[in-house]
Image: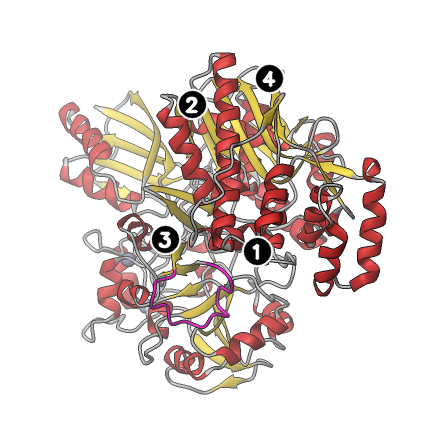
Amino acid sequence: MRAKIRVTGIVQGVGFRPFIYRTAVKNHLNGYVRNRGDAGVEIVLEGEKSDIKNFKKDLRDKKPPLAHIYETITETLGGENRYKAFTIYKSSKELELSGSVIPPDVAICDDCLKELRNPEDPRFEYFFITCTDCGPRYTIIEGLPYDRENTTMRDFPMCSFCKREYSDPLNRRFHAQTVACPECGPEAYLTTSTGELIDHKDPIRETGKLLSEGYVVAVKGYGGFHVASSTILDKPLIRLREVKHRRQKPFAIMAPTLEAIRTFAEVAPRERKLLTSYTRPIVLLKKSRDHHLSDLVAPGLHNIGVMLPYTGLHYMLFDEVDDPAFVMTSANPPNQPIIKDDEEALKGLGEIVDYFLFHNRQIAHRSDDSVARVHGQRQVLIRRSRGYAPTPVILKEKSRRCTVGLGGELNNTSCVLLDDKAFISQHIGDVENIETRQFLEEATKRLIRLTNSKVEAVACDLHPKFATTLIARELAEEKGWQMVPVQHHYAHVAGLMAEHGVDEIIGICCDGYGYGVDGEAWGGEILFCTRESTGFGRLAHLQKQPLVGGDLATRYPLRVAAGILHGKANVEDWLLENKLQFPHGEKEIEVVLHQLRKVGSLIKTTSCGRVLDAVAALLGACYERTYEGEPAMKLESLATKGRDSLNLQPKIQGGTLETTGLVLEIFERKDQIPKADLARSAHVYLAEGLASLALEKAYEKGVRNIGFTGGVAFNGIIASRIREIVESSGLKFLVHETVPPGDGGTSFGQAVVAGLYAS
Ligand SMILES: [Zn+2]
Ligand SMILES: [Zn+2]
């Protein structure tokens, strides 16, 4: 029998051809296997029918750990047998099928880690040791098929030893494109802040020592540069905060082992699993009672973002020091993508760092670290990037057409939806300037090309002035795609529906800001969504509150509090007591009060984020938002230490959950009740109010599913309280599992609305 099998999926860069080779030989089959330009694999087999059957069984059951098979198409070939053996053929550039993709970067595997530490091994202490099961992929690939000459490993021709392993079917590195050793692979070297080479035999361990001593070093990794420093000494951290203009934003840290992490944070079993998974995200962990790292790492927060090393280089940084962790924060100038090129790094970081630890392999595509946290037993992805992108999210059904979603403005990603797969890009960032705009366009084009997608529609936000909306309009005109604007919160809920394959849902969608269909600022919504493309119904929302000074109110939450309390309490005296919290002091307060007298003309918002912000300011947890979500995050941290002693009944009137009463109560009792308790009570009030509104609407509509999405869904206290209420009522409670609930997930929801729910 002769047969041709075409396989789509994640089948390049995962040791698939070597596996096919071994499986064919084992089953006495001749023929060939080759990679194709569409990221798929083509196999031709000749032999007994029963052997081919066994081959296909092995293909299903024994595929390599990183491989994902989406589809196999088998056709019987006529004619005489042609092959005398089974061979791995040179790749073809053919673009035939769609929907395959290359794997994400994968953390160093246990076998490679053992070799890294084995003095007998030729790759002993080689910082970029990899095999077919591990190493960079997405960040080094410039073109398809996935062959060394199409990656940035092209600059490193294999030595005879590596070549021997690469050509040996029995070797773990048979056809491993990233194979390298100290002889032939990339090299690491240390330079001064101006790029002058420092001659050192052991630059990586020297870097570890420098960090331990209090120096700041930029470290080049797989998908970009990190800025690294001590987590114990205050001096480098103070400096880092000054020069990076990050007064409060928490720094991610890297610890060498789980044991090291346990000296300063609590690690639950589900968190351990995430930390050690091959995706190696940053996981937000609860600081332990004997937390001994500097308060400057994650100021004012009860948790801290920690990751384990994911390359040999990272492991080696810790070899000769006792530090429990190093700061490893993405090196990106304000509002710009993570730095990936050496020149760019010298220019952008030279004044921030004391040294650079470079390696001489180019980074083809940038990718930030991913961030996750765990609620109970569930993972919540805060940022889905390295280790995940471009692995698709698999839906329960196929899209009616191929679409691309460009997301919104902040924390953005893009998404290509093809059949039942949603390919979400790496983290792009805030699309507000030329650099991030370019990054978004490049990443999107690349996803389309990698998956060989034929896009028919481009989805974007409803906001007419977002940069992403303008890009969508340009693309629609240029390519003849249909343009589909999608309301921000509808995108969140639609994404949640698609993830779970449900037909209708009452969605609780809470975040900071989304442009509403009425042009107002939404952010605390109860939506009824079905699969009809006619859209959604806004059934209820939080009480509308004035934003004094528009964007200034987002930055200085005391303004929101003043807006809510105006006319209900003596705001004037209280503002004057807090005049130091206003950049322009009394003068500014005068302006605020003046605006409040004409409250009717102010912009209103239903944002849940703004209410949390206001409470944070009232309780002194945060007066100025220096990074996205800061007041709400600090309020959650405060609330973890308190109990709900206020015990307020949610006040609901005609589809509106009132918030003025809550804020007023907190204002009036802030000097009598512990602040942590009040913080807790605010969380509980909002959670219970939102849950009962959602339940009421679910009964009205006869809907069995209630979902929770939007940036506020990161909040552990609110999410778990809503869950308790919904589940005890017997309805189903749905949250995101594979897509971020925040704005990193909106591109996905948009693509779903334009593709899956299109008429
Ligand atoms: Zn490996
Ligand atoms: Zn070599």
Which image quadrant for residue 491?
top right
The residue identified by callout 4 is 533
The residue identified by callout 2 is 501
Q: Residues within 10 Å of mark 3 (few under 14, many from 20)?
A: many
Q: Main secondary structure of the magenta part?
A: loop
Q: Residues within 10 Å of mark 1 (few under 14, many from 20)?
A: few
x, y percent for residue 740: 48, 41
Secondary element at image label 1: loop
**Given the image, on which type of amino acid does mark 4 rest?**
Ser
Vertical relation: 24 (above or below) 191: above
Closest to the camera, between mark 1 and mark 4, is 1
Q: CA distance from mark 1 to mark 3?
A: 52 Å
Query: In this picture, which residue range is highlighted in magenta?
Result: 287-301
Closest to the camera, between mark 3 and mark 4, is 4
Verify CB contact (< 8 Å) between mark 3 and mark 4.
Answer: no
Q: CA distance from mark 2 to mark 4?
A: 16 Å
Q: CA distance from mark 3 to mark 4?
A: 38 Å
x, y percent for residue 272: 29, 53
Q: Residue at x 37, y 74 (%)?
A: 317
**Given the image, on which type of amino acid does mark 2 rest?**
Gly
**Given the image, on which type of amino acid does mark 3 rest?**
Val
First in sequence: mark 3 or mark 4? Answer: 3
Question: Which disc number belongs to residue 106?
Answer: 3
Q: Nearer the viewer, residue 671 or 492?
A: 671
- For ligand 2, the image quadrant comes to bottom left
Quarter of the image for the N terminus: give it. Answer: top left
First in sequence: mark 2 or mark 3? Answer: 3
**Given the image, on which type of amino acid does mark 1 rest?**
Asp
Question: Which disc number belongs to residue 600?
Answer: none
Q: CA distance from mark 2 to mark 3?
A: 29 Å
Secondary element at image label 2: loop
